[in-house]
Amino acid sequence: MLIPKGALVVSCQARADNPLHGPVHMSAMAQAAEAGGAGGIRANGAEDVAAIRAVTRLPVIGIAKVWDDRFPVYITPGFEQAARVALAGAHIIGLDATARPRDGEPVERLIGRIRDELGREVFADIATLEEGRAAHAHGATYIATTLSGYTDETASRKSAAPDLELLSALVAEVPAPVVAEGRFDTPELVAEAFRRGAHAVVVGTAITNPREITRKFAQAAEAWAATERL
Ligand SMILES: CC(=O)N[C@H](C=O)[C@@H](O)[C@H](O)[C@H](O)COP(=O)(O)O
């Protein structure tokens, strides 16, 4: 199952420290996203992926985040993690395809094995145009701006805004469906991504993380209170 052109993909992820962590809440989030018009779901870990597959008909991009102090790559770093989310029902496997050091096999081999041995499409999370080109050359189906601003090389690009320049550069240079992901937090930015040629747009925090959404509103409330005290 592929991601339809023009789809809004909703990322339903909650880390262990988030009160919404786990398959019960994440599958409810996915159902709500589907009811609201999402065309795909991105989810982390075999448990969440399986629970989401059980309640929605949408294509699911499965990832498996594993943190290891020795290596910066944490989004589906190896074949074992990819195999687990594939077995759980992910249609597409998302992984870090940056040029950063990783444990185990090089990313080109990982992409090849996911395609050949698991029969799944690969969704490459990258941070630069070069990484996007390489991921496409290695056989990834989708190229996504997910990691711009989150690698040492691109740290200066991290701001409140998404990396629209990288999106446009990928669309111009890489003959593959390019997905906008990372800090697309308003409907206007989603529209802008499509104007720039995005195949799909992934939105996470702004839809599925009530703690972070609350923080934004609470900051506005606090700022107003501070002004009042002056
Ligand atoms: C950098 C990284 O680890 N990104 C993760 C990838 O799975 C998620 O934490 C993001 O929520 C996701 O990419 C969607 O982005 P946003 O939440 O900004 O809409």
Image: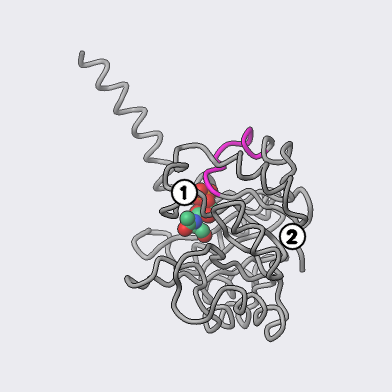
Task: Classify the position of the C terminus by image quarter.
Answer: top left
Nearest the viewer among 65 and 55 is 65
Say which amino acid is labelled 2. Ile
Q: Is residue 224 above or below residue 219?
A: above
- The N terminus, quarter of image: bottom right
| Residue drawn at x 70%, y 52% as measured from the top left | 178
Q: Name the secondary structure under disc 1.
A: helix
Picture coordinates of residue 42 (x, y %)?
60, 61
Residue on which disc 2 sits: 3
Circle on res. 214:
none
Badge 1 or badge 2: first in the primary sequence: 2
Location of residue 31 with respect to 186 vertically, above or below: below
Q: Identify the residue at image location x=62%, y=83%.
A: 87
Horizontal side of residue 157 vs 112, given as left or right: left
Work out how far the residue at label 1 is from the one at label 2, CA to CA, in angstroms: 27 Å
Q: Residue at x 61, y 55 (%)?
A: 130
Vertical side of 154 occupied by 217: above or below: above
| Dot 1 alpha-carbon crowd within 10 angstroms: few under 14, some 14 to 19, many 20 or more | few
x, y percentage for residue 25? 49, 62
Instruction: Count the numbered circles shown.
Output: 2
118 drawn magenta: no
User: Does the segment drawn in magenta span residue 186?
Assistant: yes
Q: Secondary structure at mark 2?
A: loop
Q: Does the CB distance between marks 1 and 2 fall below 8 Å?
A: no
- Say which quarter of the image contains residue 186: top right
Q: Which residues are magenta?
A: 182-190
The residue type indicated by label 1 comes to Thr
17 or 27: nearer the eye?
A: 17
Badge number at residue 154: 1
Farthest residue, direction left:
229
